[in-house]
Image (cartoon, rainbow, N blue to C red):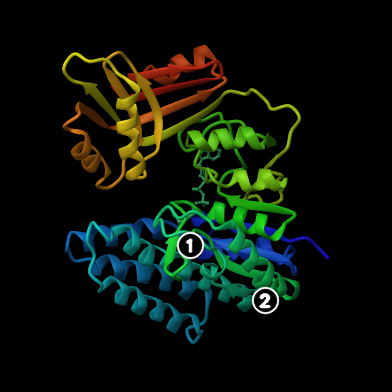
Amino acid sequence: MTKTQIYKFGGASVKDAAAVKNLAKILRNRLRNNFVIVVSAMGKTTNHLETILSLKLKDQDYSVNSTILKAFHLDICKELFPAEHVIFPKIENYFILLHHELNNPISKDNYDEYYDRIIGFGELLSSRIVMEYLCFQDLLVLWQDARELICTDSDFRFAKVDWEKTRRNCQTQLKPKLEQFPVLTQGFIGSDPKGRPTTLGREGSDFTAAILAASLDAASVTIWKDVPGVLNADPKIFSDTVLFSELDYQQAAEMTFYGASVIHPKTIKPLANAGIPLFVKSFINPEEAGTKIHNLSKAGAAQTIVVKKDQILVSFKVTDFAFIEEKHIHLIYEQLQRLKLRVNMLQTSAITISIVIDSQLFKLEQLLAELKNDFEIRYNEGLELLTVLHADPAALAKLISDYEVLLEQSTRNTTQIVRRLK
Ligand SMILES: Nc1ncnc2c1ncn2[C@@H]1O[C@H](COP(=O)(O)OP(=O)(O)O)[C@@H](O)[C@H]1O
Ligand SMILES: N[C@@H](CC(=O)OP(=O)(O)O)C(=O)O
């Protein structure tokens, strides 16, 4: 029996009608049974849905935003299908369902659960359009609701996978279908034990591909991107980037940990554990080899740059002339854990603990409110966290020449700098 292959197409690879046509072209000579296609929401749909949610939360009118989102999907369909195609009433139906969900009351307390009920509509719309288009092009694929496969806990917006149940679903429900036809499903979404929709964290569709691969004992995963593969820096920020033809799992995991957004950070671990290779390939030049991530006996040491934007530096100063003790760190971490905030950088001095976190709606104000009686707190928003692996000193100096450095930390192979433009 042939082993399963998984292809994942993200927002950029389904951002408009031309992109969907290109996706079909990539699949034309590659599609077979035992083949899973995972798709994300089209273009920036998830961000648009987040905007609708934040308007709804503020009790503001979101009708224009939802009309624009619907027109965006319908316009794509008009370029892909004849006017009488079944996709048009299906899109109407999805938007009726979306409005129905949006009519439920929302508050800061139920925000995360509410978010997960709304945000997955992007993937549902996209997967339906792509599946119908492939079938319309005589590339027969089955549509599968990922929420029936990916079982998670109820930690809405950051749901953890129940690997055992997910594997069982994949083996008993998905595998028999795959023996007959290729299957197309959604990234990013799952469901909790009560059947409520959950999501795996923003940009989590790469992770879905890895979950399915591990649960199906797949041969490989390929994620199709708008870049030639994994480069030593984001080409949208830096010129003269270099392509890695191959990377060790460990190297790739480290890059994603520091914020290299080309791969979702959770993607590597399940693949590394199962020894399943991950290919990162260009949907613009699909014949090019891209990057292969697998077990390498010797990892390279090329300078690699990662920039994480929208960072907040928060400094907690102990009061009453005391020094920093473990209990202070414990106090802060307890709140960070409760708020599901990850520390991207930590530094302690005699009287201050400094942390760098991602900017997230409500989270900073909640953190400050919880800890304001224990510390004197100061913070700076709108910063960048620059991480350089195997830094070349001259290049590093150039990277900060136009910036004010607020915090700096170096280990043997890694330099981290919090910076803002002068
Ligand atoms: N080291 C890197 N190598 C390649 N691309 C990178 C790197 N770091 C960040 N990127 C960015 O990742 C983007 C692709 O990832 P992403 O936008 O999440 O794809 P999609 O949402 O289509 O799956 C690229 O357009 C590029 O700007
Ligand atoms: N659509 C979701 C999930 C995702 O993974 O998207 P992408 O593959 O475009 O990064 C998001 O934007 O968060």
| In the image, residue 246 above or below residue 270 | above
Q: x, y percentage for residue 209?
A: 60, 56
Which label is found at residue 370? Answer: none
Q: Which circle's residue, 2 or 1, is located before the other in the chain?
A: 2
How far separated are the C-alphas under marks 2 and 1?
Answer: 23 Å
Question: Which residue does the image show at 22% across and 61% down from the upper left?
Answer: 107
- Residue that carries the numbered disc 2 in the rendered image: 140
Left or right of 224? Residue 89 is left
Q: x, y percentage for residue 60?
A: 17, 63
Question: Which residue does the image show at 62% across and 32% down from the upper left?
Answer: 251
| In the image, residue 295 above or below residue 327 | below
Please identify the quadrant where the C terminus is shown: top left
Mark in the foreground, 2 or 1:
1
Left or right of 212? Residue 312 is left
Q: x, y percentage for residue 187?
A: 53, 60
Question: Which residue does the image show at 37% across and 21% down from the upper left?
Answer: 347
Instruction: Kindly tell me whether residue 393 is visible in this rendering.
Output: yes
- Residue that carries the numbered disc 1 in the rendered image: 189
What amino acid type is highlighted by mark number 2?
Leu
Instruction: Kindly tell me whether residue 243 is visible in this rendering.
Output: no
Q: Quadrant of residue 248?
A: top right
| In the image, residue 329 above or below residue 273 | above
What amino acid type is highlighted by mark number 1?
Ile
> What crowding class fits label 1: few (fewer than 14 Cα within 10 Å), some (14-19), or many (20 or more)?
many
Q: x, y percentage for residue 148?
A: 54, 71
